[in-house]
Image (tube, rainbow, N blue to C red):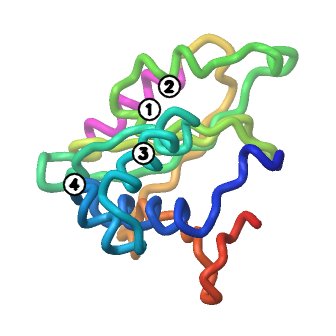
Amino acid sequence: MAEKDRIDQVDARIIETLQADGRRSYAEIGAEVGISGPSAHERVKKLEARGIIRGYGALVDPAAVGFGIVAFTAVTQAPGTITTDLTGEFAEIPELEECHHIAGKADYLLKIRARDTKDLERVLHLVQTIRHVFTTETDVVFSSAFERRPLRLVRETGTPEAS
C-alpha cells in the first residue's frame, strides 16, 4: 500500500463510527474521535474523494420486504469461454445481490435474494440460460448468524489495522 493510500488512526476511527451509524453529525463524529466537527467534516470529505467511503444508505431487512430466501450459486463457465466476462449479464438480474469472480472449481459466486422457492427457481433459470454458463451449483441458506459486518480498522492498541 502506498504511503498516500494509508489511513491514520483518526481516519480509521471516523470510518468505524460511520459504519456503525452513517447518520451521525460531524460534531458527533468529531467528539467521538477527539477532533472538532469542522475537522471531522474535512476528513470525511477527503475519505469520500479518495473513494474510501463510497456512499451511504439504509440497511433494509430483506425478509421484511418479501425476500425471505437467500442462496449462493457457484457458476462455472463453458470450456474455452473463461476469458468472457459474464458480470454484465449477471448485473441485469436484480435478485443477484452480489457477484464475485472467484478462483477454484467455479468461476463466479452469486448471492441471490428471492421471494420463495418458486422465485428462486425463476432466478436460477435466468442465470442458467446466460450464454457461456456451463453449470451451476446452488446452496440455500437456512439462517445467517451475521451479514454486512463493519470492517474493523482499529486494533485494540488504537492503531489502524492497515499500518
Q: Residues within 10 Å of mark 4 (few under 14, many from 20)?
A: some
> Which mark sits nearer the N-terminus, 4 or 1?
4
Q: Is residue 76 left or right of residue 124?
A: right
Give the Cα distance between marks 4 and 1. Answer: 37 Å
Residues under numbered marks 1 and 2 in contact, where contact means CB atoms less than 8 Å apart: yes
What secondary structure prevails in the magenta region? helix
Image coords of residue 142 (percent x, y): 37, 67
Label 4 belongs to which residue? 23
Give the Cα distance between marks 1 and 2. Answer: 5 Å
Image coords of residue 156 (percent x, y): 60, 88
Label 3 belongs to which residue? 42
Looking at the rendered image, the disc whose residue lies closer to the viewer, 2 or 3, is 3
Q: Residues within 10 Å of mark 3 (few under 14, many from 20)?
A: few
Q: Amino acid at mark 4?
A: Arg
| Farthest-out residue, right | 80
Give the Cα distance between marks 2 and 4. Answer: 37 Å
Label 1 belongs to which residue? 124
Q: State the extent of the magenta-drawn residues as a range.
A: 118-128
Label 2 belongs to which residue? 127
For the point 47% across and 44% down, the residue is: 53
Q: Quadrant of residue 45?
A: top left
Image coords of residue 106 (percent x, y): 74, 41
> Which mark sits nearer the N-terminus, 3 or 4?
4
Q: Is residue 119 above or below residue 39?
A: above
Give the Cα distance between marks 3 and 4. Answer: 16 Å
